[in-house]
Amino acid sequence: PEMRSLLNLDEIEEVATKQISKKCWAYYYSAGDDLISKRLNNEVYKQILLRPRVFVDCTKCDLTTSLVGHNVGMPLFVAPAAMARLAHPDGELGIAQGISQFGAMQIISNNASMTPEQIVEGSLPGQIFGWQLYVQNERKKSEDMLVRINNMPDKYKFICLTLDAPVPGKREHDEKSQDLGAKLPVTSAVKSGESRPGGGGVGQQLFWGTAADLTWKNTLPWLAKHTSLPIVLKGIQTHEDAYLAAQYAPQVKAIILSNHGGRALDTAPPAIHTLLEIRKYCPEVLSLVEVWVDGGIKRGTDVVKALCLGAKAVGVGRAALFGLGAGGTEGVNRTFEILEAEMKTCMRLLGVEKVSDLRPKHINSRAVERD
Ligand code: FNR
C-alpha cells in the first residue's frame, strides 16, 4: 500500500505482519513468557494523563535536543534491534535512511544483519549512531569489533552496553516458529558458515556465545581499555541500579531504562515505573547521567509523557522494524513522520514550545505511581 495512507503505528504493524515471513514476525513480535511486560510497556502510557494549558501561543514547536553532547533533530531514537534484513532487504541502512531527514539517532545492534561500516556508509553527513555491544565469551571478538567502531568517530558516538539479557528470555512465539538453524543471516556476531546448535528460535541462536559473567567490576574497566567512547548502559530496571550506574559518570554518560521490549524477564517493570522510582529515591541520577527510556511506544503522546518525567530521549524498537517490514526505507520514514507529527500536536496542545520545557506538571501520573 501507499505509505501515506497509513495513519498510525498499529496500521503499519498490520501491513508489516502480512508482508514479512512468519519466522520474522515471530521473532519481532515475541516477548518473554506471557508477554505481560510487553503489554504493560504500552499500557502504562495510557494511564498517564496530560494536563494541557490553554491560551498559549502555539504557532511554534521545536523538537531539537542534544544527546550525550550531540545535537539531534528530535528526542526519539531507534533502539538496537537485531536482524533488520529478516523484514526487508533495505535492512539497518534502510532504517538509517528512513530517519535521516528527522535528524534522529540510531543505535546499531551487535547482531545487526549488515556490518557497522555498510550502515553508516549510506547515511547523511552529521547523522549520528551508537553501537550496541553484547560482550562475547571470546572477548577478542568484541575487542575486534570495538576497534572497527573506534575507527568511525564521525559516525559512532558511544557504545551501548546491554545489561538486561545476559541470558535470553523464554520467547515461545520465536521458539515455535521453524528453526532457522544455519540459515541465520551473517551478523557482526555470526560469521558466515558458522553453525550453531539448533532449536530455541532466532533469539536463542543469536545469544549463543554471549557472555553471562559480566559485572560492574569486571566489565567497565575492560571496556575503558578498548574504547574511549562514552558508555550508555541499557536495561536498567531499578532505582538501585540507576544509582550504581550514575557512580560511573562521566565514563557512563547515559542509561537506558528498558526491559528489552518485554523480551527478557517477563513482569519486569516498564521504564516509566523505573523512572518514577528514580524520581522518588535518587533524583540526583537525572543530573549525573542522561536517562533515556524505551518500550511500548505507539504514539507521540507516549514519547512526550516520558519526556515530561525527565527522560532525555525515548527509543523505539519494534516500531522501526515494522515500519521497515511495511515499506522498507519508506515505511520507516512514514513511521517517524507519524510520530513526529503526533509529538508536535501533543506539545502544541499542551502549550509547550520546546522539549526542554516539558515538566512533570504537564502530566498526571498518579494512576501509575506504586509506592
Ligand atoms: C530487540 N532489542 C535489542 N536490544 C539490544 O540491546 N540488542 C539487540 O540486539 C536487540 N534486538 C532486538 C530485536 C528485536 C526484534 C526487538 C523487538 C528488540 C530490544 C530493543 O533495543 C528495545 O529495548 C525494545 O525493542 C523496546 O521496546 P519496543 O519499542 O519494541 O516496544
Image (tube, helix red, strand yellow):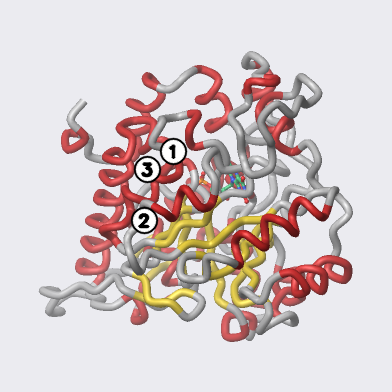
Residue 5's place in the image compared with 63, above or below, is above
Q: Is residue 48 visible?
A: no
Q: Nearer the viewer, residue 196 or 161?
A: 196
Q: CA distance from mark 1 to mark 2?
A: 13 Å
In front: 213, or 13?
213
Pointer 1: what residue? 91
User: Could you give the CA–CA distance between mark 3 and mark 1, rounded to whole angstroms?
Assistant: 5 Å
Q: Which mark is residue 94?
A: 3
- Could you tell me the amino acid type at mark 1? Gly
Work out whether mark 2 precedes mark 3 in sequence or the reverse, and give the earlier one: 3
Residues packed near mark 1 inside 10 Å, few (<14), some (14 to 19) or many (20 plus): many
Label 3, secondary structure: give it. Answer: helix
Disc 2 designates what residue?
123
> Where is residue 242 shown, x and y percent of the image?
70, 71
Going from N to C along the chain, the mark reached first, 1 or 2, is 1
Residue 90 position in % (x across, y down): 38, 36
Q: Which quadrant of the frame does ligand 1 lie within?
A: top right
